Amino acid sequence: MSKKKSLTTSSQGVNQFLNKVASTPARKAGGDIGRLIFAMDATASREPTWDNACHLQGEMFMATAPLGGLAIQLCYYRGFMEFRALDWCEDTATLLSQMSAVKCLGGHTQIERLLNHALQEHTNRKLQAVVFVGDAIEENPDTLCQLAGKLGLLNLPLFMFQEGSHPGVRSIFQQMSHLSGGAFAPFDLNSASELKQLLSAVAVYAAGGHQALLDFSKRSGSEIKRLTRQLKD
């Protein structure tokens, strides 16, 4: 699918959902630290969002401190068949250093490689979630959906966040998140606060678990229920 830019598709309901979930006082059973893969398309069209993420990613750690913390592995692809999975980190400074060292380069998407990597990492040691931020798909959708389904069988949800509003990308991202038992949301490229909420919310999910979302949705409005219902029981 094309990487052509489109108007932002920010939703106040999405903002409210993510902001409130990020502040939900959930607790992760057993006291184990949550593990989350944070993956980004680092091709040329993603450069503005990458810069924003470098400033805002610390919110992921801040939001999960009361829940026992979080370990994050930054993954990205760019250029000609370059895919990197960096060392796991548990603090803001390390993740910021990793992200700041990355420069966006033109190239095709490599979401299939990312999903295969997530499957391998989950086999080695359980993950709680995979976050993907991107704006395009240039691969076989059937292959990506098949891999997303495998993640779903392993109870590893994909949180697919789309920059822009390309309808074909949106449809496939939604299918992938559904098959994995995860969720989809667009985000506003020009809204730093929205991106911060996206990062914080999924980090809290990884640290606090699914039940926190279910409990929260029972006392929330219809828009929040609609989004939380994307997650499989």
Image (cartoon, rainbow, N blue to C red):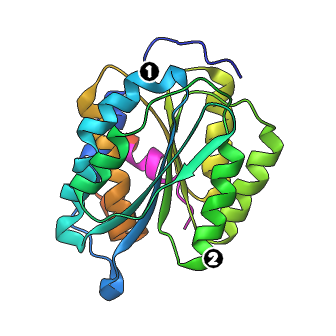
The disc placed on residue 51 is none
- Taking the magenta stretch, the answer to whether it contains residue 68 is no
Q: Position of residue 22 (x, y in %)?
A: 26, 53
Range covered by the magenta-colored residues: 224-233
Residue 68, given in percent of the width and then of the height, sits at 24, 74
User: Quick check: can you spot residue 164?
Assistant: no
Q: CA distance from mark 2 to mark 1?
A: 36 Å
Residue 123 is labelled as 2
Locate residue 199 relative to residue 127 in the image: left or right. left
The quarter in which the N terminus is drawn is top right
Front one among 8 and 103: 103
Mark earlier in primary sequence (2, 1): 1
Quarter that holds the C terminus: bottom right
Residue 79 relative to residue 230: left or right: right
- Residue at x 43% of width, y 17% of height: 8
Helix, strand or loop status at disc 1: loop
Picture residue at 60% right of the left edge, 20% below the top: 166
The stretch drawn in magenta includes residue 231: yes
Residue 113's x, y, as percent? 69, 50
Q: Residues within 10 Å of mark 2 (few under 14, many from 20)?
A: few
Q: Which residue is mark 1?
A: 9
